[in-house]
Image: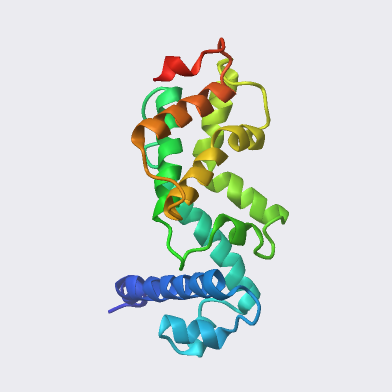
């Protein structure tokens, strides 16, 4: 067996350990915070030797930096599923509901949005660039809407804030059992969010009922 085939054969096993380390780190930060986070804690939670972690990450800072990216990939893979199929409105509403569904399925072992945005390095230029690339399909949706004259000419972050952050909040409220999952109410909320970013005549709430 040559070196290339050996690496390919064992890559799933290697990647699995990397994922275990990510899951363990996220769980510890989500439940106990960053304070006092140690490689030994992570190793114990992941069920691997402490030395194994250093085969993947040179230190804790690099591990947390890669965790930030991994969290973004997981979120993007879920909320951008099938995001290029259909009209702009269909694509937007699919993403909106994907966000709600993702938010309500999170567990105490997953970082909350609030915990994620407080991870070290979150505001660094390299991470912001990575975030923009990872959510490229969402930026494309906003840019297409503006190019067609359908969306208001706002910065993409502003468009996200007024139209999709409500979906984040609703998903969180449903998960915390502060709100029941009511498809009709969610469809109304989604329609209102769509209306917020589109250049159209004002409509009454009854139009969506």
Residue at screen point 67% across, 27% down:
154
Residue 80 spot, x, y in % from top left: 43, 42
Residue 34 spot, x, y in % from top left: 63, 74
Q: Is residue 155 above or below residue 71?
A: above
Along the viewing direction, whichever of 187 and 15 lies nearer the viewer: 187
- Residue 17 found in image quarter: bottom left
Along the viewing direction, whichever of 132 and 177 lies nearer the viewer: 177
Residue at screen point 47% across, 52% down:
75
In the image as oriented, which residue stretches furthest toward the right? 124
Residue 54 spot, x, y in % from top left: 54, 83
- Residue 47 found in image quarter: bottom left
Q: Is residue 153 above or below residue 139?
A: above
Which colour style is shown? rainbow
Residue 3 can be seen in this image: yes
Say whether residue 157 is left or right of residue 41. Answer: right
Residue 115 spot, x, y in % from top left: 60, 62
Residue at screen point 39% across, 20% down:
209
Q: Is residue 96 above or below residue 40?
A: above
Labels in figure, total: 0
Q: Is residue 33 above or below residue 190?
A: below
Along the viewing direction, whichever of 3 and 113 lies nearer the viewer: 113
Residue at screen point 60% across, 45% down:
132
Residue 80 can be seen in this image: no
In the image as oriented, which residue stretches furthest toward the left? 1
Say whether residue 57 is left or right of residue 80. Answer: right
Quarter of the image containing the N terminus?
A: bottom left
């Amino acid at each position: 067996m040559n070196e290339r085939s050996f690496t390919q054969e064992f890559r799933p096993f290697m990647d699995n350990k990397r994922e275990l380390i990510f899951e363990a780190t996220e769980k510890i930060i989500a439940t106990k915070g960053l304070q006092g986070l140690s490689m030994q804690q992570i190793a114990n939670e992941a069920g691997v030797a402490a030395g194994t972690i250093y085969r993947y990450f040179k230190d804790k800072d690099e591990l947390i930096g890669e965790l930030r990216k991994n969290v973004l990939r997981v979120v993007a893979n879920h909320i951008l599923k099938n995001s290029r199929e259909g009209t702009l409105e269909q694509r937007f509403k699919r993403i909106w509901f994907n966000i709600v569904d993702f938010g309500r399925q999170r567990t105490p072992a997953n970082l909350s949005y609030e915990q994620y945005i407080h991870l070290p390095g979150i505001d660094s230029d390299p991470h912001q660039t990575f975030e923009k690339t990872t959510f490229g399909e969402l930026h494309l949706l906003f840019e297409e809407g503006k190019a067609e004259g359908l969306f208001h000419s706002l910065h993409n972050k502003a468009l996200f804030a007024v139209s999709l952050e409500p979906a984040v909040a609703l998903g969180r409220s449903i998960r915390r059992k502060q709100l029941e999952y009511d498809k009709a109410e969610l469809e109304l909320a989604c329609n209102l969010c769509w209306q917020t970013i589109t250049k159209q005549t004002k409509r009454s709430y009854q139009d969506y009922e």
